[in-house]
Image (cartoon, grey):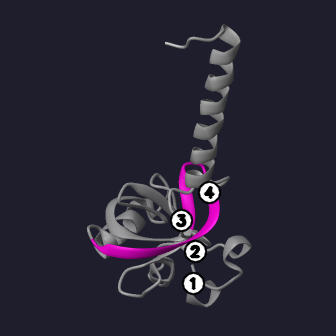
Amino acid sequence: MFAGSPASFLFVWAGISALIGILIWNNYGSEGFLWDTDVITGTVTHVRDGDTIEVDGVPIRFEGVAAPELKERYGRESKYFMVDLVSGKEVRCELTGERSYDRYIGNCFPDGEDIGALTIAAGLARDCPRFSGGRYEELEIPA
């Protein structure tokens, strides 16, 4: 295939590998984003729990919202509330650029309403001021 020495083959291979690396970096960046923007719009294809949904298969955790885990008290209620609220609907999500495990962090809006705020106002999640800056504190229902 190559008429040169093994060293020239390695040189060409290194160049191709570097080019692939640059293309991957440009497309995914240091944070692993698949988009050129920090906003995605799509259909909610899955609800994991009260603070994590998947938009066209991309997992997004709501910034500053802490819903109970599925095995905790009200965990299933929180998830079912979210399923009724957004399942199959078109949403717009503003991503922060951060990730938590396999999830992108952001705030999502069906029809312009903040999903996290709606869940907290329903008493099925709590404000997490460390990440929200306290923006949901006034919506919390006393225990």
Spatial CA distance of label 1 from label 4 is: 25 Å
SS of the residue at dot 1?
loop
Question: Would you say the residues marked 3 and 2 are in contact, meaning their CB atoms lie under 8 Å apart?
Answer: no
Q: How dense is the environment of label 1, judged by Cα within 10 Å: few (below 14), some, or many (20 and up)?
A: some
Question: In the rendered view, does 102 fall on the left or right side of 88?
Answer: right
The magenta segment is 89-105
Q: Amino acid at mark 3?
A: Asp
Q: According to the image, label 3 marks what residue?
A: 36
**Residue lying farthest to the front in this orientation:** 3
Q: Which mark is residue 99?
A: 4
Q: Which mark is residue 111?
A: none
Tag in front: 3 or 2: 3
In this rendering, the answer to whether 118 lies above or below 17 is below
Q: According to the image, label 1 marks what residue?
A: 140
Q: Amino acid at mark 4?
A: Arg
Question: In the rendered view, does 94 fall on the left or right side of 135?
Answer: left
Image coords of residue 51 (percent x, y): 49, 65
Q: Taking the image as drawn, is residue 45 in sight?
A: yes
In this rendering, the answer to whether 126 lies above or below 142 is above
| Residue found at x 37% / y 80% | 110
Which of pointers 1 and 4 lies earlier in the amino acid sequence? Answer: 4
Image coords of residue 85 (percent x, y): 32, 75
Question: Would you say the residues marked 4 and 2 are in contact, meaning their CB atoms lie under 8 Å apart?
Answer: no
Q: Which mark is residue 126?
A: 2
